[in-house]
Image (cartoon, coloured by chain):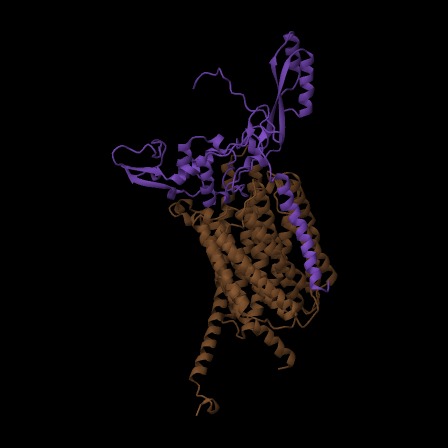
Amino acid sequence: MKNGFVIFLAAFAVLFTSWSAFVLGPQLQLGRAKQVAVLNSSDVYPINRPGEAAQGLQIYRANGCAACHTEQVQQTGVACDVVLTAAGKNPSAVSNLISTLKLNGLTEQEAESAAGKIAAAGGKVETHVIATGADISRGWGLRHSVAEDFLYDNPVQLGGVRVGPDLAGVGARLPDANWQLLHLYAPRSVVKDSVMPPFRYLFVKRKIDGAPSPDALKLPLTQQPDEFMPTPGYEIIPTDDAKKLVAYLLSLHADVPLYDAPFTPPQISTNAPAK
Amino acid sequence: MTVNENSTNQIDASCRVPLLVLFGGAALWLVVSSLLALVASLTFHMPEKFGDCPWLTYGHIQPAADDALLYGFCIPAGLGVALWIFARLGQTPLRGAMVPVVAAHFWHFGVLVGLVGIFVGDSTGFQWLEFPRGGSALLFFAYLLLGLWALMNFSGRRESGLFPSHWFLIAALFWFPWIYSTANILIVGWPVRGVVQAIIAWWFGNNLVFLWTSLVGLGAAFYFLPKFSGRPLQTYFYALFAFWMLIIFGSMRGVPAAAPVPAWLPNLSALNSLMLIVPVIAIAVIGWKTVCGAASQECKGGSFCMIKFGFVSFVLSGLMLFATACPHFSQLTQFTWLSAAQTQLQLYGFFAITMFGAIYYILPRAVGIEFRFPKLIRVQHWFAMLGIILFVASLAIGGIEQGMKLQDASVPFADSTKTVLPFLRASTMGLLLLVIANLLFALNIFAMILAWKWSVAKAVFAFVISPLEKSEVKA
């Protein structure tokens, strides 16, 4: 290449192609994305985060939480369980048949064939779809993360390295607000050996004046090493920023089945004894 | 002194002030960046100590350290080297030196604004794009000014030939304004919806951290390697091929394999990362054929050594990108420290060390003063080399161990953190060596700036106190 203008044109053509593929293309495909239907339900997904949680996203951004936490649950595949819901008119034949079949951890084709055999014998079955993978087994989510999970977030905080655990489903996994506050205030008081720095600047330590504040951190008196306890007569009050951050964390539960990430939600038995 | 040497001296001298401002600020940010990275790394030794001051938490200080290295050191150092190479290759002194001087001041001020922004919680939250809009606007206009000035000087060159270094440097000059404006407009200014933000941020990060630094670093290496080894670049056509392949495959990647985005994006990224092996091998062959077999000078820890080390780091960094795009290995290494290891190898092992070599060669010629502590150059090179090797190797091995634990569901998550901790602590030692290397570098640069200021002050003083010529005295 002997001419500077030729280099300019070459660079322009390549960069324009790259820009079209990675900026224009995704914007055309996803830029006008709308809510989608939740599988087997009349609900739509996602809905905007509540106001305090949306403000909490800004605290999450400002403190650089995404430097250590991802919000991307991974999934390696799905496994299917075939579940008998009614034995039909010939229960003994169905039960004999079932005893010869493998019903758990099947591929989709295996599940279809097993369900077909049971249905032919007169039984009624349901096929449950369960996501698989290390993240799912750890309880970080019920399915892999998808673009829809972040539709209303600004900025989208996907993160890139797991210094700490994935947070895409932390609201469902650890729904206790006091636990979350304790964890922010003194991570090692609830997670032994945590390398997370404590976010004490999101809390105020103050003298108890009259009745203790209802907002004060509830420190479990047992099991707590002394180093995490406030001086007697003092209490730890979360600031608004801490409360917003926790509201955001609790709003993170990408746990509805969608067309591009199907699974069968775990059944909650309605006649289970009260806890 | 021959006419030719005289004109070369003139060309070098014309770049003096812009280079002092660009390199002086860069040296300062380099030290700041490594100190910040060192403090960030201490989180893994004593996390409890950082809880009372928001500025000291990892989420503030690590992005600040990364940005101080990239925007504070890499870009101004690269632009300075590009200005000088354009002037030398074009056999034309730099005209209007005030413009790059003003632009360089704006640039460094922009970096300061951006870093303060991160510390006070105004970060945008996207890696490599954390600077809030005030800082980014300053950077953008400073770059535009510097880039346009470099191109104007390029187009007014006396020697009309176009060398491989030119291709790489011109492409880089053009690349940054496009990607930086796209990312800032669509992510910060008028944000697009949902994961498109993340896709654009990944695309931008790759195009700046990998491609821009590769273009400028290789542009400099393709100028200096033939110069030091005393034989032409081997060969022109290999370089042409490598240039094309690098910009094509290097620009169309960046989306991680498991991102929650339409599958064609990670697949296209992975394909292009795998194809990157082609330009990386071509570039390795160019370097090998140019340096080996030539009646090369001994490098003795000087500029030649540094540029050779940088070149090898580039090839290794490219191979790491290739490896982490292979299907099974990418699953193992996603979300681990391995990508941080690759980034540091690219930014420091390749780019920064290549720039050290270039700056050590350029500055004494441009300023006309030798370095105050020439022996420290060799010491600095050893610290930089050992530091980056220790840092990258520990994070890479730790990253792979961490990945194996993360992929095994029977291992609790806390174990993956525990496994990687010793490696993170070893990387702190690497950082410590880098801090020393950066301080030694800054020491030589600042000593030169002071020596130059002193010589200017002496000249002014001598001029002021010199007796007037008779002809200047009015009757």
Viewer-closest of B19 and B154: B154
User: Residue B22, position in %: x, y?
Assistant: 53, 64
Q: Quadrant of the N terminus of chain B?
A: bottom right
In the image, is residue B43 above or below residue B307? above
- The chain drawn in purple is A
- Quarter of the picture holding the C terminus of chain B: bottom left
The answer to whether B158 is drawn above or below residue B104 in the figure is: below
Seen in the image, is B61 located left or right of residue B345?
left
Q: Quadrant of residue B83?
A: bottom right
Give above or below for B71 relative to B295: above
Q: Is residue B408 visible?
A: no
Q: Position of residue B320 (x, y in %)?
A: 63, 49
What is the quadrant of residue A216 in the picture?
top left
Between B254 and B108, the residue placed more toward the observer is B108
Mark yes or no: residue B362 visible: yes
Residue sitting at x 67%, y 56%: A11
> In the drawing, does residue A196 fall left or right of residue B336?
left
Pinpoint residue B473: horizontal percent, then vertical percent.
45, 90
Image check: B182 left or right of A199? right
User: Among all residues in the image, which is located at the extreme front?
Assistant: B475
Q: Which chain is brown?
A: B
Q: How many marks?
A: 0
| Residue that protrudes farthest toward the right in the picture | B237
- Where does residue B396 sit, x and y in percent of width and height? 57, 48
Q: Nearer the viewer, residue B469 or B333?
A: B469
